[in-house]
Amino acid sequence: MFSCLWDFPEQDVDIFGELEGQDNHGDGARQSSSSLSSSSSSSRSSSNGSEGGETSSGGSASASGSSSEGEDNGEEVEKKVHGYEEGDLFGSNSDEKDLFGSDNEDYCKTLATSPFPVPVLPVIRNTNNQNRGNFGRGRWQNDRGAGILPRPGPYPQRHNYGYGSKFNYRHDERFVSELKLTKSEETLSRNALRFKRPCELACYSRVEGGDVHFDDRSLRLFKRLITEDVGADLNEGYDTFIEKKDLGSEGFGDLLAAIRNRNIPLGNIHFVTFRNNLNKILATAYIRNEAWEMGVHKRNGVVYLDVHKLPERPKSDLDRRRCYWGYCFESLATEDPRRADGEGIHHVDANAEYCSVIKTKLGAHRILMGAEMDCCDSTDDGRRFYVELKTSRELDYHTEERYEREKLLKFWIQSFLAGVPYIVIGFRDDGGRLVRTERLRTKDITQRVKMKNYWQGGVCLAFADEVLCLALWNSQGDYEDYILQFAPPFNRLELLQAQSCPDAISNHV
């Protein structure tokens, strides 16, 4: 009944020499200075030898090596050194004595310990810019707090600057390991990983009301004449729309129940997860501003990745209406035997779904995942394949680049992982009216963005391989529970210790 979805092969995703002249010049200066010092010392020695304390004209020499002229009218001609008189440099020579001699009474009466207290120097303050003030980044003092720019110059950087304590996860007692997002796109692109062709092993359906059946009764058939509905109002039936409930770990229990129902062995499986978790991991290779987290629970050698839904801001009516436009387009693009020709859309229930259980392999990691499928179609020979249905706002010159960078990336990841070969996109205007439709082949999306160098599928696969290694290598023993999260400031993935395991996983084991 179940067969492989894609029919394609496996994919690979002397330094001081310049200062020599200056050193020689410096040596000459030092020699000149030494000559000057020697001359001055000679002058002092001569003066100390005389009892009268007068300076002898014959015992001193000038800085240029020439002798001084004789005395005129009993007065000595004072020598000049760099424009200063010698008496200015070395003090008065009229009353010189040996301060430390044995005959010096003042020295002998000096106490060993000073009666004065040790002076305390004032705190050294920054004298580079007295007008900076205590706060702000500019020249004017203000009370606006710390600025947003880093400290200039050689000042030491502040620890955790720009982030509050809630972002300092290293001090979290639950911290186990991390994966810093430092590898470049070029480095990841060199890791050519093989991705095995997805193969369907089981399925289950959730009908209106929440009951689960292990068959394909909720699988819808794609309507090939969807172009006839261009111009339809996607707001039709919004008043009777039933929003999707958050099942939490209960939805993961339905996936495990389908695995048990088909007796699928898990002895050689590394990860059991929903496709949504893998979507988040692969997209993080390029989209670094969307937070997420998931549970990591290892039991009997298998790592179960549980879906965690983060708190969201309350949805406005426009947010709920835009969400409904997607479900309404799915109803328009699929055959409904209960809806007569020309009948409008009504009673759309987002809880009814069909889920496929798929086995694949990313690098060395064998993965068993559940993936919700929108609808299916068949080839001329009767071989069934799945079709992904998406909606998007009509493109213009300003939005086309972001659409190809982000939305097409998410579309490709979701379809590629589950082996969905086709994507049908319904473009609508701001009022919710269907403008046009477009059918894309999943394998053509990467070629579309390759010439623009927006993103590479192989980089996403290589990044996901490293993340799975982080979760697997840190789960060496059984019965270990963690939380894998990607949160602000969005510069690393972190593995935190968890306190419990969902009952759906514990009961399954």
Image (cartoon, grey):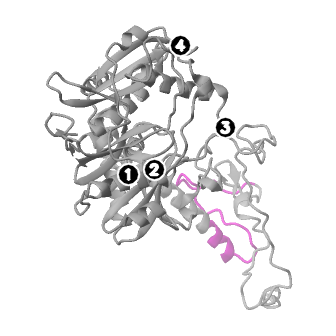
- Give the residue at mark 3: 314
Relative to 270, does residue 119 appear above or below in the rendering? below
Q: Which quadrant would the N terminus be assigned to in this image?
A: top left
Cα–Cα gap, marks 4 and 1: 35 Å
Cα–Cα gap, marks 2 and 4: 32 Å
Kindly check if marks 4 and 1 are in contact, taking CB atoms under 8 A apart as contact. Answer: no
- Between 386 and 340, the one lying in front of the other is 340
Kindly check if marks 2 and 1 are in contact, taking CB atoms under 8 A apart as contact. Answer: yes
Inspect this view and state whether residue 402 appears: no
Relative to 482, does residue 393 appear above or below in the rendering? above
Cα–Cα gap, marks 3 and 1: 29 Å
Query: In percent of the image, x 49 and y 23: which residue is there?
Result: 328
Residue type (three-letter) at the residue carrying disc 2: Gly
Q: Earlier in the sequence, mark 3 or mark 1?
A: 1
Cα–Cα gap, marks 2 and 3: 23 Å
Please provide the residue range marked out in magenta. 43-72
- Between 451 and 434, the one lying in front of the other is 434
Q: Is residue 486 left or right of residue 135?
A: left
Q: Earlier in the sequence, mark 2 or mark 4?
A: 4
